[in-house]
Image (cartoon, rainbow, N blue to C red):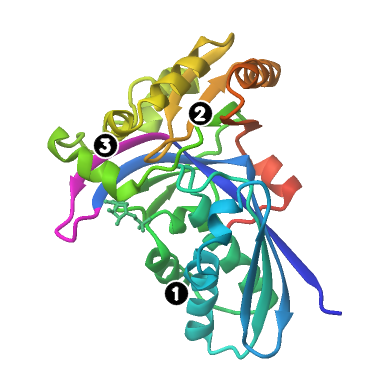
C-alpha cells in the first residue's frame, strides 16, 4: 500500500485590502495584509504510477463542488500543470476535505491549489525552483501565490508580489459567511466608479513603531471591495454588525471580495463566546471561531510555507 500524504489548506484572510490601480488586462493592483487561520480545508493523496489524477471531494462544504466536473477543479489543474512542468509520469488519487465555504473571499480554492502544489511536490519528489512554482501558482489564480507562501505578508501587484513581515501574534478571530457565494469579477466590476486608494497608505513599520495594537493599526485602512460587495449582498452588513456587537470585538471587516467577514477579539474566550451567541441566532450562517497562524502554530500543525 502506498503512503498517504496530507496538507492543510488554511483560509486566507485579507486584514486590509486596498485597490490601488488597474492593469490593461483588467486585473486590479492590490495592496493587502494577508494572514492565515487554523481553519481550513485538508487535502490528502496517494501516489499512482499510471499518471492519472483522480479527485474525490468530501466534507461539509462539498455539495456545490461535487456537481462540477472535477477536471476544472483547481486541485486537478494544479496537478496537471506540475506534471507538464516536471515531465513526471506519476499520478495521484486525491481527497479534498472541503470545510471552507466556496467563493467566499477566504481563498478556499486558491488554498486548495496551493496545498496540491505542496503535496505533489513532496509526493512526486519534484525539484522545481521558486520561479517555476511562482509561475504555476499565478497561472492558477491571483490568490494562489500568497496561499503557497502561507505566511503573513504584504501582498501587492495583482497578488504575485509578496513581502514578508514580522509574524503577527496569534489573533483570536471569528469567521462568518452568510451562506451565499459571491462572484469576484462581479464585485470588481461593481466598484469600477469608486476610484483607487493611494499606494503605500499602510506602512507596517510606521503603524507599529507608534506602539499601536494590531486592531488600532488596521483601523487606518479597510477593504475597498466592501461597498461593492454589500450593494450586491446586503447580508454582509448584518454579518459585520453581528460580529461588532459582541463583547471584546476589536475589529470587524470583510475578507477578499466577500462574503466572509472576520471579527478580531481580545481573547480566545471572547471569540468562542461571540461565535456561540451569533450561531444561536443565525443557524444558516457558517461560523468558525479560530485564530491566525503564526510561526509556532504553523510548526505544530505542520503547515509548510514554500
Ligand atoms: O485570478 P483569479 O481567477 O482568482 O481572479 C478572478 C477574477 O477576479 C479575475 O478574473 C478578475 O476579474 C478579478 N481580479 C482582479 N484583480 C485581481 C484579482 C482578481 O480584477 N488582483
- At x 21%, y 37%, the residue is 191
Q: Position of residue 7 (x, y in %)?
A: 68, 59
Disc 3 is placed on an element classified as loop
Question: Which quadrant of the figure contains the C terminus?
Answer: bottom right
Mark 1 residue CB less than 8 A from any atom of ligand 1: no
Query: In the rendered view, does 112 fall on the left or right side of 165?
Result: right
Kindly report the distance in space between the C-alpha atoms of the residues bearing marks 2 and 1: 33 Å
> Which residue is identified by label 3?
200
Kindly report the distance in space between the C-alpha atoms of the residues bearing marks 2 and 3: 23 Å
Disc 2 is placed on an element classified as strand
Q: Position of residue 99 (x, y in %)?
A: 64, 46
Q: Earlier in the sequence, mark 2 or mark 3?
A: 3
Q: Position of residue 298 (x, y in %)?
A: 67, 46
Classified by dominant secondary structure, the portion drawn in magenta counts as strand
Q: Quadrant of residue 285?
A: top right
- Nearest the viewer among 279 and 41 is 279
Amino acid at each position: 500500500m502506498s503512503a498517504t500524504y496530507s496538507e492543510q489548506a488554511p483560509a486566507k484572510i485579507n486584514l486590509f485590502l486596498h485597490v490601488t490601480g488597474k492593469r490593461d488586462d483588467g486585473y486590479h493592483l492590490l495592496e493587502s495584509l494577508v494572514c492565515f487561520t487554523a481553519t481550513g480545508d485538508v487535502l490528502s493523496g496517494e501516489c499512482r504510477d499510471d499518471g492519472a489524477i483522480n479527485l474525490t471531494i468530501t466534507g461539509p462544504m462539498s455539495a456545490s463542488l461535487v456537481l462540477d466536473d472535477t477536471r476544472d477543479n483547481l486541485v486537478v489543474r494544479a496537478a496537471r500543470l506540475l506534471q507538464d512542468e516536471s515531465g513526471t509520469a506519476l499520478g495521484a488519487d486525491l481527497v479534498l476535505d472541503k470545510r471552507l465555504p466556496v467563493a467566499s473571499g477566504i481563498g478556499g480554492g486558491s488554498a486548495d491549489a496551493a496545498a496540491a502544489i505542496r503535496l505533489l511536490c513532496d509526493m512526486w519528489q519534484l525539484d522545481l525552483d521558486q520561479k517555476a512554482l511562482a509561475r504555476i501558482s499565478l497561472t492558477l489564480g491571483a490568490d494562489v501565490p500568497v496561499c503557497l507562501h502561507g505566511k503573513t505578508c504584504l501582498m501587492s501587484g495583482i497578488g504575485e508580489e509578496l513581502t514578508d513581515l514580522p509574524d503577527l501574534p496569534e489573533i483570536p478571530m471569528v469567521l462568518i459567511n452568510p451562506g451565499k457565494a459571491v462572484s469576484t469579477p462581479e464585485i470588481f466590476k461593481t466598484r469600477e466608479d469608486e476610484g483607487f486608494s493611494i499606494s503605500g497608505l499602510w506602512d507596517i513599520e510606521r503603524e507599529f513603531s507608534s506602539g499601536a495594537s494590531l486592531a488600532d493599526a488596521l483601523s487606518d485602512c479597510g477593504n475597498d471591495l466592501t461597498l461593492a460587495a454589500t450593494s450586491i449582498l446586503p447580508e454582509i452588513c448584518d454579518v459585520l454588525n453581528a460580529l461588532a456587537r459582541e463583547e471584546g470585538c476589536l475589529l470587524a471587516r470583510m475578507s477578499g471580495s466577500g462574503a466572509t467577514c472576520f471579527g478580531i477579539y481580545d481573547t480566545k474566550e471572547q471569540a468562542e463566546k461571540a461565535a456561540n451567541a451569533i450561531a444561536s441566532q443565525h443557524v444558516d450562517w457558517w461560523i468558525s471561531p479560530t485564530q491566525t497562524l503564526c510561526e509556532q502554530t504553523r510548526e505544530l500543525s505542520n503547515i509548510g510555507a514554500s
